[in-house]
Image: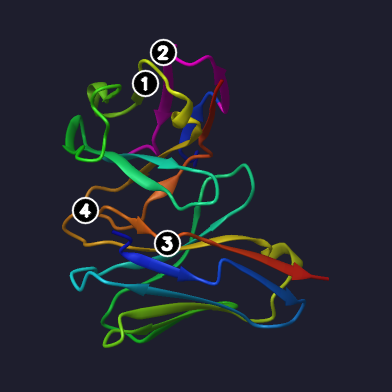
Amino acid sequence: EAGVVQSPRYKIIEKKQPVAFWCNPISGHNTLYWYLQNLGQGPELLIRYENEEAVDDSQLPKDRFSAERLKGVDSTLKIQPAELGDSAVYLCASSLQGGAEAFFGQGTRLTVV
Amino acid sequence: QQQVKQSPQSLIVQKGGISIINCAYENTAFDYFPWYQQFPGKGPALLIAIRPDVSEKKEGRFTISFNKSAKQFSLHIMDSQPGDSATYFCAASKSSARQLTFGSGTQLTVLP
């Protein structure tokens, strides 16, 4: 069974440019999460989806970040415009609805120069 | 406010030794406590998890000890191997919210 798939693996962009990350969760997992992991730190939740509904986006910086999960499967996280401080690893995770175990993808490492 | 505090930040253990990583939490509403293992360039992988109705859970060489009154839990890795060298994160969540709050991580190095 395939795990959580994220793309791209790496992205380097100039500040003020837009960037988008894509996530395909494990088949059958209704819950999808986007986490931010800064270097040397634990992941921090940005947004959680139950099917296509964003049920927890309180920590998503909405002035520049947006996310969508069309049809309740794949999800896209966008940053526009990117700032130097956005350089980090963006992790996608999924779990069964009502399940506690979250499975993570390999992440997208973003570098803003 | 850091709700899950993890220590030590780094740990060096000889092969065959016991690795111990500790975490403390503040929110008494947490009811799920997983440990994740992360290798460089990879996402965190669930290692073992415990709920507060038990004080200990063992899976192979990995054991979680849980102290509800002290609001602490720890990971013990028995017979540590060089392949265990990775960063370990404790986490906690409320089942109702299912938002994992992670500790700051422990970089474990097991010397051959």
Percent of width and height locating residue A5: 48, 33
Q: Which type of secondary structure does the marked residue at label 3 adopt? A: loop
Assign a secondary structure to mark 1: strand
Q: Do marks 4 and 3 share a chain?
A: no
Distance from Cα at disc 4 to Cα at disc 3: 23 Å
Q: Amino acid at mark 4?
A: Gly
Residue at image location 57% in from the left, 20% down from the top: A12
Question: Which class describes the residues within 10 Å of circle 3: few (<14), some (14-19), or many (20+)?
Answer: many
Circle 4 sits on which residue? A98
Segment colored magenta: A9-28
Report the residue at 36% width, 80% height from top: B72
Say if mark 1 contacts mark 4, CB within 8 Å: no
Amino acid type at mark 3? Gly
Residue at mark 3 shares a chain with residue at mark 2: no
Query: Does residue B14 sit above or below A106 in this rendering?
Result: below
Residue under label 1: A79
Q: Relative to residue A110, is residue B59 depicted above or below? A: below
Question: Could you tell me which residue is drawn at 22 percent across and 69 percent down?
Answer: B27
